[in-house]
Structure formats: C-alpha cells, structure tokens
Image: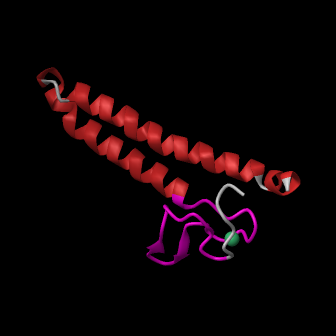
Amino acid sequence: MKEKADLYAAQWNALRLRNRLVWSVLAVGIVVLFVASSPMFAKYQGIVGCTWFALFVLSGSYYGAFRCPRCHKPFFKAGFLASNTLTKKCLHCGLAKWT
Ligand SMILES: [Zn+2]
C-alpha cells in the first residue's frame, strides 16, 4: 500500500503548495488591508484592495486548475461552471484526494 501512496506523492505535494499559496494570499491580504485601512494610507486603499482581490482570484484559479494525477483531467472541475474545490475525490475518475 505504501508504494501506491507514493505513486502520486509529487502531484499531491504540488496541490498542497497551491493550497498554501491561496491561504498565504488570504492571510497576507488581511494583514495588508488592515494596515491600509489606516487613514495614513487612504489614497492606496483602492489599489491595494483591487490588487489583493486579483491575486486571490488568480491563486484560487491556479488551485482549481489542478489536474488529477491519474486521469489528468481537471480534478475539481466536471465541466464549464461545474466545479467543486472542496471535493474529496476526482470529479472524473473518483481518485480520492491525497491517495
Ligand atoms: Zn481523475
């Protein structure tokens, strides 16, 4: 069984990295927005907010675009507008996450 778990280890590590990227963008964004909410930075609030939102959407899309290690189809997307980033298994071949 151990060999099977190691089979897609590199791909799952890549997914873990993408997951961390999304959470890092979210966490850093909250801190940066908190700092930017100070009246001293009032004129930068718009650009900071927009940049953070764009980065968050980009990192989220990057996470959502992860391809299944087994069937190589988008892991979280079953079709156009049909996606579920919280799924525990591939929406195409049913490969369980982290296996
Ligand atoms: Zn699959």
Q: Residue furthest top?
A: 40
> Which residue does the image show at 79% across and 54% down from the upper left?
5
Q: Which residues are magenta?
A: 64-92
- Horizontally, residue 37 falls left or right of residue 98, namely left
Q: Main secondary structure of the magenta part?
A: loop
- Horizontally, residue 82 falls left or right of residue 90, namely left
- How many discs mark residues in the rendered view? 0
- Horizontally, residue 26 falls left or right of residue 13, namely left
Q: Could you say which quadrant of the image residue 76 lies in? A: bottom right
Indicate whether residue 6 is drawn in magenta: no
Percent of width and height locating residue 84: 48, 68
> Which residue does the image show at 57% across and 63% down from the upper left?
88
Which of 8/43 is in front? 8
> Which residue does the image show at 39% across and 40% down from the upper left?
26
Percent of width and height locating residue 2: 85, 51
Which of 58/6 is in front? 6
Image quadrant in which the C terminus is located: bottom right
> Which residue does the image show at 53% across and 65% down from the upper left?
87
Ligand 1 sits in quadrant: bottom right
> In the displayed structure, would residue 95 be above or below residue 2?
below
> In the displayed structure, would residue 57 be above or below residue 75?
above
Image quadrant in which the N terminus is located: bottom right
